[in-house]
Amino acid sequence: VQQYEIAVLPGDGIGNEVVPEALRVLDVVSAKYGFEVGYRHFDWSCQTYLSTGAMMPDDGLDRLRDHHAILLGAVGWPGVPDHLSLWGLLLPIRRAFDQYVNLRPVRLLPGVTPPVRDKQPGDIDFWVVRENTEGEYSQLGGRQGEGTETELVLQTAAFTRRGTDRIMRYAFELARDLDKPHVTSATKSNGIFHSMPYWDERFAAISAEYPDVRVDQDHIDILCARFVMSPERFDVVVASNLFGDILSDLGPGVTGTIGVAPSGNINPERIYPSTFEPVHGSAPDIAGRGVANPVGQIWSAAMMLDHLGQPEAATDVVRAIEQVLGDQSAPRTPDLGGGAGTEDLGKAIADAL
Amino acid sequence: VQQYEIAVLPGDGIGNEVVPEALRVLDVVSAKYGFEVGYRHFDWSCQTYLSTGAMMPDDGLDRLRDHHAILLGAVGWPGVPDHLSLWGLLLPIRRAFDQYVNLRPVRLLPGVTPPVRDKQPGDIDFWVVRENTEGEYSQLGGRQGEGTETELVLQTAAFTRRGTDRIMRYAFELARDLDKPHVTSATKSNGIFHSMPYWDERFAAISAEYPDVRVDQDHIDILCARFVMSPERFDVVVASNLFGDILSDLGPGVTGTIGVAPSGNINPERIYPSTFEPVHGSAPDIAGRGVANPVGQIWSAAMMLDHLGQPEAATDVVRAIEQVLGDQSAPRTPDLGGGAGTEDLGKAIADAL
Ligand SMILES: CC(C)[C@H](C(=O)O)[C@@H](O)C(=O)O
Ligand SMILES: CC(C)[C@H](C(=O)O)[C@@H](O)C(=O)O
């Protein structure tokens, strides 16, 4: 039997509540499809930071390396500045393991009422492909004149040919496999003087390699407006690290699925483990009450199965999620307008398998 | 009588069609309120660029300087790369005249069906206050290894204490005058390592000067999602140049008013002229057909009147716009679902005054 070793990092807050539900579902679906999933648990979190001064041990990355994938809950907690917790755990993992693709589906789900009007499941169904290792997320820069009236802070974004080309190629390859081979580039070449004209240049160059794929591009300001006004026009959207971050929250915002959206931080060459995590955060406001919606975590586990080479199991998990969400008599957590708990919803999805 | 000299720059495309309607309305409202508006026309545009190699003459900025305000249509045309047209005209004006505030209303209007459900006029009514002279819009940076596999492009954003503090103070002063003194800061301090933690630091410092104003902050990704999911929660949103650009298109996208939204590029100290322009662009797809909606340009003229010290006239113009838009029997341009032309709608608004 095929065996997978998964590093499990629940992290902070509701991460600890939703991760067990994903493992529950993984146990059921692996038995059904005849493979085995083993877990190694890591309790690195903001608590670790508060007691040790670091989010993970010095050899943390080495200890994660020899897993088939990483399943992550959420990172961040009041009392630890976000840029310390994230640059201490989440972002180093993305970079050390060259997870240069951040992949997020934007999909209208049955049983979820979106904030936009007149849309049905099927109308909105696309992917945001976000560059995940360079660009605007950078530690390049610094401060001059600290504490004075002439204080100046510089922040430098870095775009490499290699980094730009490979994320675009990933987007085109993904688009090719879809019903509608169509890629939209998120740019801002009218305002961001150096990096975004370069982004456009590479988009033109790479799109020439894929004459079968329809392309267009929008500046990020109007693109965000179009996500709301005409989300049905998108199939694959490729974006820089920052723009992709924005679009992959906005998209689920439009479909009403921000609490249940998944993401993959993917190393497509499979040289390093990829990380799968829900889009939502650690939600300190509801943490500890057992009412968090586990669907984002479970859907992330489904994306992980797909990446591991178990596409049928992955599709089955997504089907089970859609079945339970679409069934008004199934348990619903408070964010979905019901009174059920995290476990109830997790069990219902496991049962649907 | 009070006299105002306005520099009028229709620019490209539909700018040439909607600006005359704004002047029509200005003529009517100035007569009604007993002041005079004189116009000096400048035909600088992408055509100028194509024939002279520059968007404006060398002494262009000097020729604009001695006006009370600038009324601008739209800049940009196919064949001239956006970053050249905009950095050749629009952006130098913003900077040379220290128009450090970009102010844009987000308001649900009568007669306009927004893409979001269950919202009525009055539910969504807030301001985006965007820093307009520094930050991510910068010419700092460049390229190394051009044309090679190791090509690298750097783009540096610059945040100064002075620039950051003054835009925040403007937002707080604006909020103080509103029913609900409430400012939301757009940040991304969890991902953008140097500049955004600094932004938060200054927001904390400046908000301490305004204990009467309620404050909160959101990372730009979730903030964009909240613009769609709960736009009624906002009153004043303060943002950096790039984030403000995104939010001030997304906001009108949510209210269905992207074709009619106005903006002011304001030098609050009135040392230099301020520029007023619609949010929409030059719209090459419909230019020359006389069907562009002139409301954004007319509303921009209303913001100009307010800035010039004619708040009653300004309010009256906005009232006339709302009256005409809310009247189903009034002329409606194609974007509003009707068959009327630019002039018809402009005249209807002038008549309503
Ligand atoms: C045209 C472009 C440079 C400009 C900007 O990004 O500032 C526009 O989007 C705006 O918001 O006025
Ligand atoms: C938490 C934060 C650093 C992170 C990001 O911006 O990448 C998050 O928003 C995400 O999208 O995974």
Image: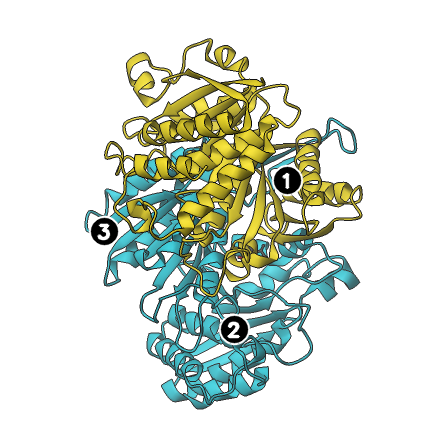
Chain colours: A cyan, B yellow
Q: Which mark is residue A18?
A: none
Where does label 2 land, which residue? A297
Residue drawn at x 35%, y 46% as measured from the top left: A185
Q: CA distance from mark 1 to mark 3?
A: 37 Å
Ligand 2 contact, mark 1 (Cβ < 8 Å): no
Q: CA distance from mark 3 to mark 2?
A: 32 Å
- What amino acid type should be assigned to the residue bearing mark 2? Gln
Q: Earlier in the sequence, mark 3 or mark 2?
A: 3
Residue A75 rendering spot, x and y as whole percentages: 63, 63
In contact (CB < 8 Å): disc 1 and disc 3: no
Other-residue count near label 2 (Cα within 10 Å), few / some / many at <14 / 14–19 / ≥20: many
Observer able to see residue B322: yes
Where does label 1 land, which residue? B195
Residue B251 rendering spot, x and y as whole percentages: 49, 49
Other-residue count near label 3 (Cα within 10 Å), few / some / many at <14 / 14–19 / ≥20: some
- What amino acid type should be assigned to the residue bearing mark 1? Ser
